[in-house]
Amino acid sequence: MVNEMVDLKAKGIVFDIQKFSVHDGPGIRTIVFLKGCPLSCRWCSNPESQCREPQVMFVSKNCIGCGKCKEVCPVNAVNFELPYRIDQSKCIKCGKCVENCYANALEMSGTERTVEEVISELKKDNMYYRRSGGGITLSGGEALTQVDFIEELLKGCRANRWNTAVETAAFVNKDVLKRILPLLDLVMMDIKHMNSEKHREYIGQGNEIILENAKFIASSGTQLIIRVPVIPGFNDDKDNILKLSQFVVSLKNVREIHLLPYHRLGENKYGYLGYKYKMPPIDPPSNEDMNKLKNIVESFGLICKIGGVS
């Protein structure tokens, strides 16, 4: 039973709930993806997660040009002369165009959900969590930007005795961490580059807050795994991986790094939103290159995995 202390009516903006994951924490897990992120990574595979508000996505290949979306829009936000089709300056996110798009060319990314609604969905897979030692992982976007919602959601998860984890860059105020860390079993934290200027160039913000928060999380006693999305030409050089490994060794009780190879999954979603994909046409790092970086990490006595938790 969910404890009565949990505010079941607390609301957040969720854009996906993905079941049966085995790479985002121990066991079989359900990932709750939340909207909103203060960073703007060039390679982001979930560009729809960056904006906090719901967004209409246009999948042009599905459009049959029937015009029903334009007919039902109450604010004339549908414009067939726009490649993206939706005039964001007018759109009120009512979803009527999506509801009436028979060809599934329009999709709503992000809906307001209560803690009660999400917990009810998570309960459907309770048996898998218990049998596998799995649980719930919050992701995004940056889940920690919706702190009021996830605090109540995590309380509900703990009341159901589910393992709890978050995927985060931790670019947040320490007060947020103080509220959330006691409710988490695992933090999987991205550190994308040790050079703050390089970090700012590719991500839009420096890394000072992130590195300080890594120290804070490590000192809290909550299990912390550092993850590095390996992006060719950005952070895959020996010097960066050496400095990152040195930093992780200095963290209290942290002994594990996961190297996540760059991929282009999600690139098509940029077009759905009317965004431009900012990454050049580069190939993912080879297995040989990934293993060279893995060897550097392991030379510091750290556990290193290529890919996520499994």
Image (tube, rainbow, N blue to C red):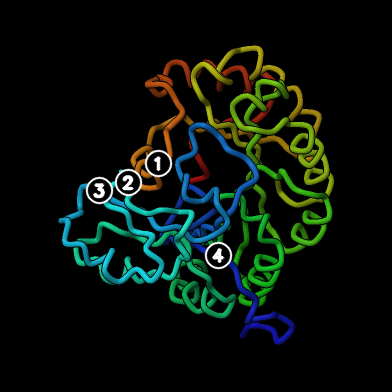
Q: Position of residue 239 (x, y in %)?
A: 66, 12
Please tell me which residue is depicted at 34% across the width and 68% down the height of the picture: 73
- Label 4, label 1: how many angstroms apart (C-alpha)? 20 Å
Give whichever of discs 2 and 1 has the lower sequence position. Answer: 2
> For the residue labelled by badge 1, is the local secondary structure a helix, a strand or a loop?
helix
Callout 2 amino acid? Leu
Callout 1 amino acid? Tyr
Residue picked out by circle 1: 270
Residue picked out by circle 4: 13
> For the residue labelled by badge 3, is the local secondary structure a helix, a strand or a loop?
helix
Residue picked out by circle 3: 60
In the displayed structure image, the side of residue 36 where residue 106 appears, left or right? left
Give whichever of discs 4 and 3 has the lower sequence position. Answer: 4
The residue carrying pointer 4 sits among few (fewer than 14), some (14 to 19) or many (20 or more) residues within 10 Å by Cα, namely many
- Label 2, label 1: how many angstroms apart (C-alpha)? 15 Å
Residue picked out by circle 2: 82
Q: Position of residue 299 (x, y in %)?
A: 65, 18
